Amino acid sequence: MSDTITQTSDKTPAIIVDHVTKTFLKRNTHSLKEAFVGWTKGKKVRADVFHALDDVSFQIGEGESVAVLGFNGSGKSTTLKMVSGVMQPDQGRVFTKGRVAGLIEVGAGFHPDLSGRENVYLNAAILGMSKEQIDARFDDIVEFSEIGDFIEQEVKHYSSGMFMRLAFAVAIHVDLDVLLVDEVLAVGDEAFRKKCSDKLKELAQQGVTMLIVSHSMGMVQDLCTRGIVIHEHKVLFDGPIKEAVQIIRTTPH
Amino acid sequence: MTTIDLNDYDVPGRSRGILDVIRWRYLLTLLVRKGTATRYRNSTLGWTWSYVKPLIQFFIYFVVMGFIFGMDRGTDNFPLYLFSGFITVQFFNEAFGNATTAIVGNKALVRKIYLPRELFPLAAIINAFIHFLPQLAILVVVALIYGWIPNLLEIGALLLGLALIGLLALGLGLLFAGLNVRFRDAENFAEIIRQLATWASPVLYTWQLIQEHLGNAVLYVYMCNPITVAVELMHFAFWSPTVRANDDDYTRGWAGFAPHFEFYILGAVVVGILLLVIGQSVFRRFERTFAQDL
């Protein structure tokens, strides 16, 4: 592998995904016994290789807002997990520049038995914030979440909407250069959704790079300028968001 | 077309292993606090359980070993001997057990957000240590009742013993936590190790009995167990100062360490460091596929 990569976006890229392939093993047996019984009956015992991503390459320039589109199981979320570092590619390389934070299933770090306040601190620290930063932003977070006095309550007593609002509020107040968003904007009621997408637009204007995975065509057209369509684990299209949405609507499932 | 200088870029998910914990120490303190805060949530007796459970177990062993098998007659201050060794092994068992399930137990986080995964086993071990402190407090009280006045050397032995247990639990904990993600057999195997730990160290009996009944060759192997070394250090720290007065009767009191004990200490430290290196490298090897195996 070479040590340099040719730049394909107009601006300096913040995210580089270079010929990334990810394979999973699809196991046909789950225990020694099952494997043995299967083997005596002449069934397939060894695992199958399943390509989740097949030679995917793209670059996202600094400050760009890009949507990753595709049908269920096409590899969108896997792509995001590669960029966030949760998963490692089997082949190819991924690079990022600056601080990366994910709104990937916000609230994953919440503990039901801790109070809202304790959870804010825990989750913000998980996303890489220091104590001083959290102290400074705590009031903003609570205000944005519209939780109010419930912040001292244990999270298990929250309604699901309150839970998601608090989790989203924490994630959105993290210092970052690159934001990864995976299907989280189905949060709360109409008014709160509007508030969230306004906040994302504000971040985009501040020059935050965004990579968004969503099935909501309205939202991605609102937030993004460019779309990458992943179909059957390969990049099918990479270009203006309008065309990308058109392609996803006309591609047979 | 321009080319990109990759030196400005980070590779996501690439960590420096256990060293990254220094940068993430604030999160580590929060994870530890979460563990202590939620441990006895919704229980009315709360931390009382941390005292009651080991005490019950201690009394069972004390009755069985002390009275039924007569260790109490052969060993002075046997309850102190028993308890100081017992909580040491207990500390190891809890630290190692918690660390083994730390990654699987934090599945939701490991699958979704990248952070140095070593944090979870490490937090589990620190939690086990905090949980060990009440037991240590009971031990100190019991020792004081027996007239315990330690000198610096004995305090040093106490710290070295606990450090050894911590090191060992971390090395083995990382190894098993990493393996456990793909092979849940690791959890069961770890449990066997924990069951053996009490019996493979001089907790319920003295090392002299090993020499007497199994011979010197077995004693050499027996002493190579780092937990045994830690337990003996704890006996030296807590039990030996209270039984030194009985020097005329060696079989009942402190008869000194096993022969060549200084080499066994050195060996235990080397084994501990070796296990940490192995544990960390296996952990990193398996870490690459944590998110997809969970």
Image: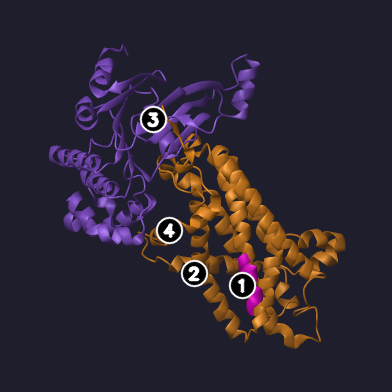
Instruction: Decide: few, some or many residues near mark 1? Use Cα within 10 Å; few <14, some 14-19, many ≥20.
Output: some
Tag 3: residue type? Gln
Residue sitting nearer the eye, A96 or B65: A96
Tag 4: residue type? Gly
The chain carrying label 2 is B
The answer to whether tags 1 and 2 share a subunit is: yes
Could you tell whether A73 is left or right of B199 in the image?
Answer: left
The answer to whether tags 1 and 4 share a subunit is: yes
Residue marked by disc 2: B51
- Mark 1 to mark 2: distance in Å? 22 Å
In the displayed orientation, state which residue is furthest to the front. Answer: B1
Residue marked by disc 1: B159
| Dot label at residue B35 | 4
Residue B163 lies, in percent from the top left, at 61, 66
Q: Which chain is orange?
A: B
For the stretch drawn in magenta, the main secondary structure is helix
Q: Residue at x 82, y 69 (%)?
A: B260
Q: Residue at x 62, y 84 (%)?
A: B146
- Mark 2 to mark 4: distance in Å? 18 Å
Mark nearer the N terminus (1 vs 2): 2
**Secondary structure under the numbered disc 2 in the rendered image:** helix
**Secondary structure under the numbered disc 3 in the rendered image:** strand
Residue sitting nearer the eye, B137 or A205: A205
